Image: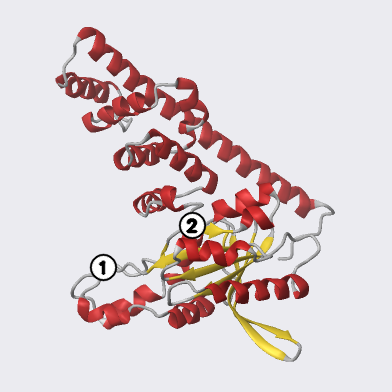
Amino acid sequence: MTKPTITGYDHFLHDLKTRIRAARTRAALAVNNELILLYWQIGRDILERQEREGWGAKVIERLANDLRHEFPDMKGFSPRNLKYMRKFAESWPDEQFVQQVVAQLPWGHNVRILDHLKNAEEREWYIRKAFEHGWARDILVMQIETGLFHRQGKAVSNFADTLPQLQSDLALQTLKDPYIFDFLGLGAEAQEREVEHELVKHITSFLLELGAGFSFVGRQVHLEVEGEDFFIDLLFYHLKLRCYVVIELKATKFKPEYAGKLNFYLSAVDDTMRHESDNPSIGLILCKDRKGLIAEYALKDISKPVGVSEYQLVASIPENLKGSLPTIEELEAEFLDKTADGTSNEE
């Protein structure tokens, strides 16, 4: 049966759905905030009592039993979790900071951060990034294990000389060094079908490793200049930087001539593809070994913004399967096949 047309109904329904979803999100965040703050307060009180009253470690077991007996429907009062609460309060002594920053993440995220990181600066950085990009718990752990904190913003670039300061800072923080393309993690008995299955996952891993905001435009993007054909390895549009990002993949160590070629590509992209509202296009050369000083000299007088980073193909597979690792050409081909529908990585 056809529903009768009601003027303005669809717009009204869409508005209601948006408001309801927003209210549910706010309610969930508020509940999480209260739970995290409660855990922090419990941990703080345990710490204070142990220091002031000299309570031993066995009090944790007793407290866990009593709390679970009183609140049988509530999870989270195991001895192990109470110890995490104590460690949580010890790591973040400032209650206001816990309320405003730390409590934005679920408890499971905070536990993983406590488990994997000892440095307070790194812990805070991952907390802020996880909330900013909405990382799931497994993604958070992966970013920690691959050392994103130490890789972010480490590419050699000429951004400071070719971009306004605000865009330069953001562009530099967008790039990493090295990029880790750890796409395979197979056991010693892996069969060809398993290797193939892992290969089809590469696109998700590639976009995730590139970082938030990258939207795929194309592979081997054709440029015609004065009747001659040129092809860009990989072309992206970055949703936060508001510009095209041209990526050139090189299976060798960095060579100075790579920068000149990419400078040419950027000029062509800016002239033929860039919209008047877009920022200047940015180039990234990914190579096996970037040789810092050589890259710095090569970029010194380049007019377009270019960064140079290394990439690593890290794979825990047996020797007899190492030939199954993708080449640069295979990686590009797979990337094209899996992103023909416009897959992007906006987080």
> Label 1 belongs to which residue?
316
Mark 1: which secondary structure? loop
For image coordinates 35% across by 73% down, the residue present is: 198
Whether residue 243 is visible, yes or no, is yes
Within the image, what quadrant is residue 4 found in? Answer: bottom right
Quarter of the N terminus within the rendering: bottom right
In this view of the protein, which residue sits in the foreground, 298 or 315? 298
The image quarter containing residue 258 is bottom right
Relative to 203, does residue 99 appear above or below in the rendering? above
Q: Dot 2, how many residues are within 10 Å of its Cα: few (below 14), some (14-19), or many (20+)?
A: many
Rendering coords of residue 16 (x, y %): 70, 45
Please provide percent x and percent y for residue 25.
Answer: 56, 40
Is residue 246 shown above or below 62? below
Q: Which residue is mark 2?
A: 176
User: Which amino acid type is shown beneath numbered disc 1?
Assistant: Ser
Label 2 is placed on what type of residue?
Lys
Residues tagged 1 and 2 counted as in contact (Cβ below 8 A)? no
- The residue lying toward the viewer, choosing from 172 and 257, is 257
Q: Residue 237 in the image: state x and y as whole percent.
A: 64, 65
